[in-house]
Amino acid sequence: MATKASRNSARLMISPAVILLLGWMIIPLGMTLYFSFLRYNLLQPGSAPFVGWENYYWFFTDPSFSAAMWNTLVLVGGVLTITTIGGICFALLLDRPMFGQGIIRIMVIAPFFVMPTVSGLVWKNMFMNPVNGIFGKIASSLGFQPIDFFGQIPMASIIFIVSWMWLPFATLILLTALQSLDQEQLEAAEMDGARWTSRFWYIMLPHLARAITVVILIQTIFLLSIFAEILVTTNGGPGVATTNLTYLIYVSSLLQFDVGIGSAGGVVAIILANIVAFFLMRMIGKNLDA
């Protein structure tokens, strides 16, 4: 057993890392809170009076705020639906023995390591461009009118691009969970005459419940801050069709040069992310207890 002296020594050794981590988190948060109560506009240097909750009022009453909140929910919900269902399908497929299984698994997981900016530019220019893109060429060769993805279905296009990047993550987590399933249960159910659909619904899916919850939790936290894909493809448009909460904060801070309102939006985003994380953590806790 560890003695009191050894425990104190361990605390002393890890304290620099803990202090650095706390500083890395608390200092930016504190500065964001501080600026959110100031009228701090980069076009008016030297003047930053205290205005209380005024920045929050202007952020909530921004005409784009309601659209940004709705777009954020649609984006997160759409990506979670595609990646969760697609991750289960790919996990079931990759769990089966096949030729070149290792290479196929690497190819499926590879998109997760592509930078969001690079992914957005590749899909925008190489695939979804209505004139020179691959999808446009295929449509023209079949006699159809090419689709202007970012002009006609911008949000669906963003959801597709983000889902393409996050699907490997969901697949990896769910495949790992699926491989931990006791095969004797499946063999016994098969010998008893249970169909594959019954084995999936009553054995596989309940076994994957915890992994699905973890995928939803981790992805939701990251999807709330999706930005690069929107910036390089649609710039939040057409109009505000793809403007989510993160992009609205970017517009307020760096395009309108209003650091105060942008900081207020950042605080709102932090509170929203923590509320979502709280409820999802409770959900995970219930699943683990079960």
Image (tube, rainbow, N blue to C red):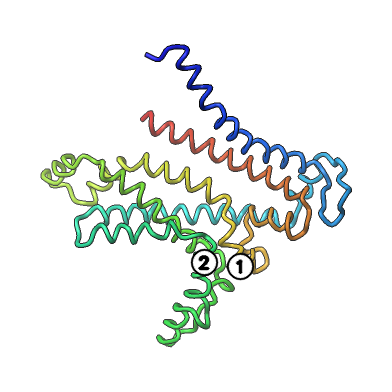
- Rendered view: 5 above or below 192: above
Q: For mark 1, give the secondary structure.
A: loop
The quarter of the displayed image where residue 100 is located: bottom left
Q: Nearer the viewer, mark 1 or mark 2?
A: 1
Judging by the rendered image, the residue that carries numbered circle 1 is: 234
Say left or right for 90 vs 191.
right
Say left or right for 98 vs 16.
left
Judging by the rendered image, the residue that carries numbered circle 2 is: 157
Locate residue 19, reporting x and y percent. 60, 30
Q: Please tell me which residue lies in front, 14 or 48.
A: 14
Q: Please tell me which residue lies in front, 1 or 290.
A: 1
Q: Of label 1 and label 2, which has the lower sequence position?
A: 2
Residue visible at 38% across and 28% down in the picture: 289
Residue visible at 68% across and 54% down in the picture: 66
Residue placed farthest to the top in the image?
Answer: 4
Which amino acid does the dot numbered 2 rest on? Ser
- Rendered view: 177 above or below 251: above
Dots 1, 2 in contact, CB < 8 A: yes
Locate residue 160, reporting x and y percent. 47, 63
Q: Quadrant of the N terminus?
A: top left
The quarter of the displayed image where residue 288 is located: top left
Residue visible at 31% across and 43% down in the picture: 177
Q: Please tell me which residue lies in front, 60 or 223.
A: 223
Locate residue 72, reporting x and y percent. 59, 53
Q: For mark 2, give the secondary structure.
A: helix
Which amino acid does the dot numbered 1 rest on? Thr
